[in-house]
Image (spheres, rainbow, N blue to C red):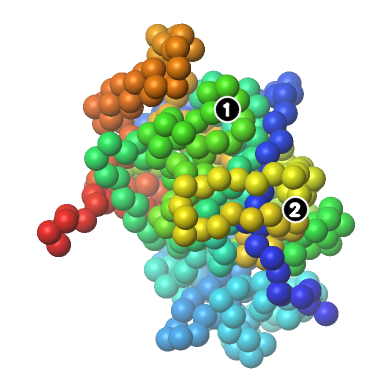
């Protein structure tokens, strides 16, 4: 029987800092290398994973089992038509089929048809509250000057694989590509995690570093303070076109590569095998601390309350590699912050730093194009736009 779908949202998440362990990083191409090549979408081997996508036709959302990829389209079976279920949550449909049944359908290929890439919608969960891991790759921790991996909430609806993000005056909009995960059932224990079908998708984690700097807890960076405010909002969480459910999730994640390109230039390249906290550890820490920690997010429209489970409407963002725009502030700025006599004096330093960074125009600007991609998870294309004019 499929698990009960009436789940609680993971609206209150965890914080658990941890000393960075010794990790050996194998040499990878420099993230500063100018390159126009983008990760080529490859279908995960059917004997190791099933790849799902969704399309919207009229009022109906169809969940598809992907069988092949080409430059222009995918070839897939309509599982919604086969099951009679047209749910916006792909897992509702997927759970109508066993792994063996999906293998049989993939082998027979009866009824398969082509679907154009632009018709694919996002496969992210339908809720607002998600769990995000900060500095979960050693190289990223090094570049931003944070030596701990930590967790924080991200409050955003999941977008699709073709999105826009607003970059307004004074904002420092940064990019991060991540491997995201979601589950086919509510997760209240590690037993639930081990039993659950786990779906992986590529996602973007856009943030405003100006907001983050203003709200950061300088005494304890890994408290997560400021991160929800900087990273939450309606356009901060695009999700990719594929939900991939592997038979061996650890092996699958170890083979994933994620990249960011801005205007055709590669900015990020990371191997998911280099994560500090793996998916199971993130879930464990979430469940351990969910009963004792609440979070603030400065948007009164979204109440933050304690939840003791990770719902089917929540995702886990597992962190990003190095190559983001934001770097550890220069020595003079750090000294000025640490030497400030009070919070008001710190704010003066922070505002000066933000103005200096904005003047460089190194953060995302209107008309920029961001592409997040992964070998097995597809790609996301985001166009950066200016805010609408007040007279429009």
Residue 290 numbered tag = none
**SS state under label 1:** helix
Between 276 and 31, the residue placed more toward the observer is 276
Q: Secondary structure at mark 2?
A: helix
Q: Residues within 10 Å of mark 1 (few under 14, many from 20)?
A: some
Numbered label tally: 2
Q: Quadrant of the C terminus?
A: bottom left
Q: Quadrant of the N terminus?
A: bottom right
Quadrant of the rendered structure where residue 207 is?
top left
Relative image position of residue 295 (x, y in whole percent): 60, 45
Residue 12, percent across and down?
A: 65, 52
Q: Which residue is mark 1?
A: 221
Residue 15 spot, x, y in % from top left:
68, 39
Could you tell whether 93 is left or right of 36 in the image?
A: right
Crowding near pointer 2: few (<14 within 10 Å), some, many (20+)?
some
Instruction: Give the residue displayed 61% in from the left and 69% down from the top.
Output: 52
Q: CA distance from mark 1 to mark 2?
A: 31 Å
Residue beneath label 2, please? Answer: 249
Residue 188 % position (x, y)? 80, 58
One can see residue 32 in this view: yes
Residue 239 in sight in this render: no
**Quadrant of residue 169 in the image?**
top left
N-terminal of the pair, mark 1 or mark 2, is 1
């Amino acid at each position: 029987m499929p698990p009960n779908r009436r789940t609680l949202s993971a609206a209150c998440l965890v914080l658990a800092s941890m000393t960075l362990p010794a990790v050996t990083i194998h040499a990878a191409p420099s993230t500063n290398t100018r390159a126009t090549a983008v990760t080529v979408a490859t279908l995960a081997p059917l004997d190791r994973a099933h790849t799902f996508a969704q399309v919207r036709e009229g009022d109906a959302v169809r969940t598809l089992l992907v069988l092949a990829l080409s430059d222009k389209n995918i070839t897939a079976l309509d599982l919604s038509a086969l099951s009679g279920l047209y749910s916006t949550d792909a897992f509702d449909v997927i759970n109508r089929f066993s792994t063996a049944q999906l293998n049989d359908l993939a082998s027979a290929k009866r009824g398969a048809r082509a679907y154009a890439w632009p018709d694919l919608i996002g496969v992210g969960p339908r809720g607002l509250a998600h769990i995000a891991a900060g500095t979960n790759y050693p190289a990223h921790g090094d570049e931003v000057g944070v030596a701990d991996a930590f967790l924080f909430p991200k409050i955003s609806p999941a977008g699709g694989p073709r999105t826009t993000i607003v970059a307004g005056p004074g904002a420092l909009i940064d990019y991060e590509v991540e491997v995201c995960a979601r589950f086919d059932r509510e997760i209240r224990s590690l037993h639930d995690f081990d039993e659950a079908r786990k779906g992986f998708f590529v996602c973007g984690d856009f943030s405003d570093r100006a907001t983050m700097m203003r709200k950061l807890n300088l005494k304890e960076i890994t408290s997560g303070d400021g991160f929800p405010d900087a990273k939450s909002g309606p356009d901060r969480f695009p999700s990719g076109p594929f939900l991939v459910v592997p038979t061996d999730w650890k092996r699958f994640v170890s083979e994933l590569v994620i990249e960011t390109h801005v205007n055709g230039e590669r900015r990020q390249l990371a191997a998911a095998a280099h994560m500090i906290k793996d998916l199971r550890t993130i879930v464990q820490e979430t469940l351990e601390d969910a009963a004792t920690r609440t979070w603030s997010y400065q948007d009164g429209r979204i109440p933050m309350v304690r939840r003791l489970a990770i719902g089917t409407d929540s995702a886990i963002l597992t962190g990003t590699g190095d190559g983001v725009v934001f770097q550890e502030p220069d020595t003079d700025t750090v000294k000025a912050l640490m030497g400030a006599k009070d919070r008001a004096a710190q704010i003066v330093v922070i505002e000066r730093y933000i103005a200096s960074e904005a003047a460089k125009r190194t953060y995302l600007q209107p008309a920029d194009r961001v592409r997040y991609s992964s070998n097995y998870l597809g790609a996301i294309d985001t166009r950066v736009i200016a805010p609408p004019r007040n007279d429009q």
